[in-house]
Image: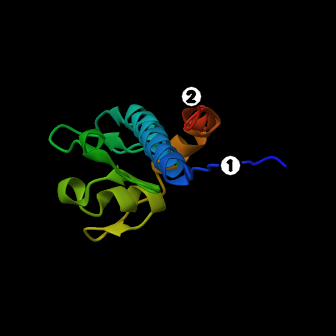
Amino acid sequence: MFGLKVKTENEMRGLQEKADKGMFKSLKHASFSIAKVMRESLVQAKGPSPAGKPPHTHKGRHLRRAIWTDVQPSMAVIGPRYSVVGDAGAAHEFGETFRGAQYPLRPFAGPALEVAAPRLGGHFSGTVGA
């Protein structure tokens, strides 16, 4: 006859914490990458940009400076702060009415996501690994 003792440890909590921490860090890097592309697409110039191109920024109205990110554990919000530019960002992005004028479609967030998309996977590789 022989005896056997087995001791098991549940390390799922530690693994989940590492996964959450890695995901948050990766999501943060990815969102800042998209915001950077978004800022770089905005050009400071006089007059409106052509329809279909990102909007121009003008002195005193810094749309570029209004771009921000808010990262939560499982999601990120990227775009212009309402407190800085109001509905102007949405009016440009989606071609809406703003202050009584109809703005043509001048997207800058959607195209920034498309440009950054091929690089986003790299932000998440090895998030839990050693």
User: Within 10 angstroms of label 2, few (less than 14), some, or many (20 or more) residues?
Assistant: few
Residue under the point 40% across and 31% down: 40
User: Camera-side residue: 20 or 116?
Assistant: 20
Give the side of residue 20 with respect to residue 55, left or right.
right
Residue 34: x and y in percent read: 46, 40
Give the side of residue 20 with respect to residue 58, left or right.
right
| Numbered circle sitting on residue 130 | 2
Q: Which amino acid does label 1 sit on?
A: Lys
Instruction: Name which of mark 2 and mark 1 comes first in the sequence.
Output: 1
- Furthest toward the left, the residue is 60
Residue 62: x and y in percent read: 22, 41
Residue 89: x and y in percent read: 34, 56
Q: Helix, strand, or loop for circle 2?
A: loop
Q: Which amino acid does label 2 sit on?
A: Ala
Residue under the point 85% across and 49% down: 1
Residue under the point 81% across and 46% down: 2
Q: Which of marks 2 and 1 is in front?
A: 1
The residue indicated by pointer 1 is: 5
| Numbered circle sitting on residue 69 | none
